[in-house]
Image (tube, helix red, strand yellow):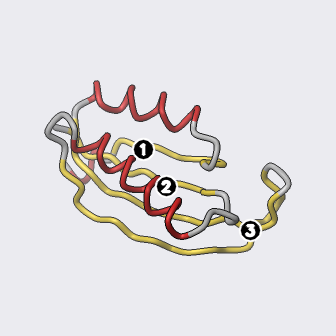
Amino acid sequence: MKAYELLLLLNPSLDEESRAALLDKVQGLITADGGVVDNFDSWGKRKLAFEVDKNTEGDYALIDFHTTPGTIAELDRVLHITDPVLRYMLLHREDRE
């Protein structure tokens, strides 16, 4: 398994229950094929440098994990079509393998 890092920028208008459900869904996708979530860090709401989809602030979450490349393709597909996810950045971390 390879090491990855996922930074999520979520819609700040999400209520706490919807936010928790979305993050559980993402972590479930990671662990579905035997992946492991190493670290989850919620950064909370922060002011954005520029507007993203008419939002001036965003809710950030950072997830460090190990999984297979096949899971990454599915994770990328799901995040791309999930409306509350404004932006995301998915990185392969060679220094953590």
Q: Which residue occupies 74% across, 73% down?
A: 47
Given residues 57 and 97, the one toward you in this image is: 57
Q: Amino acid at mark 1?
A: Leu
Which image quadrant: the N terminus?
Answer: top left
Find out whether the residues at labels 2 and 1 contact each other: C-beta distance under 8 Å: yes
User: What's under tag 2, amino acid-wise?
Assistant: Leu
Determine which residue is flagged by label 1. 91
Q: Amino acid at mark 3?
A: Glu
User: What residue would you read off at disc 3?
Assistant: 57
Q: For numbered disc 3, what is the local secondary structure?
A: strand
Give whichever of 44, 25 is nearer the camera: 25
The residue positioned 51% from the left and 38% from the top of the image is: 79
Q: Which mark, by number, is residue 7? A: 2
Circle 2 or circle 3, nearest the eye: 3
User: In terms of depth relative to the viewer, which is nearer, 44 or 82?
Assistant: 82
Q: CA distance from mark 2 to mark 3?
A: 15 Å
Between 7 and 93, the one nearer to me in the picture = 7
Q: Is residue 43 left or right of residue 47?
A: left
Which of the two discs, 1 and 3, sits closer to the camera?
3
Farthest-out residue, front: 17
Question: Label 2, label 1: how many angstroms apart (C-alpha)?
Answer: 9 Å
Sequence-earlier tag: 2 or 1: 2
Q: How many residues crowd around disc 1 within 10 Å: few (fewer than 14), some, or many (20 or more)?
A: few
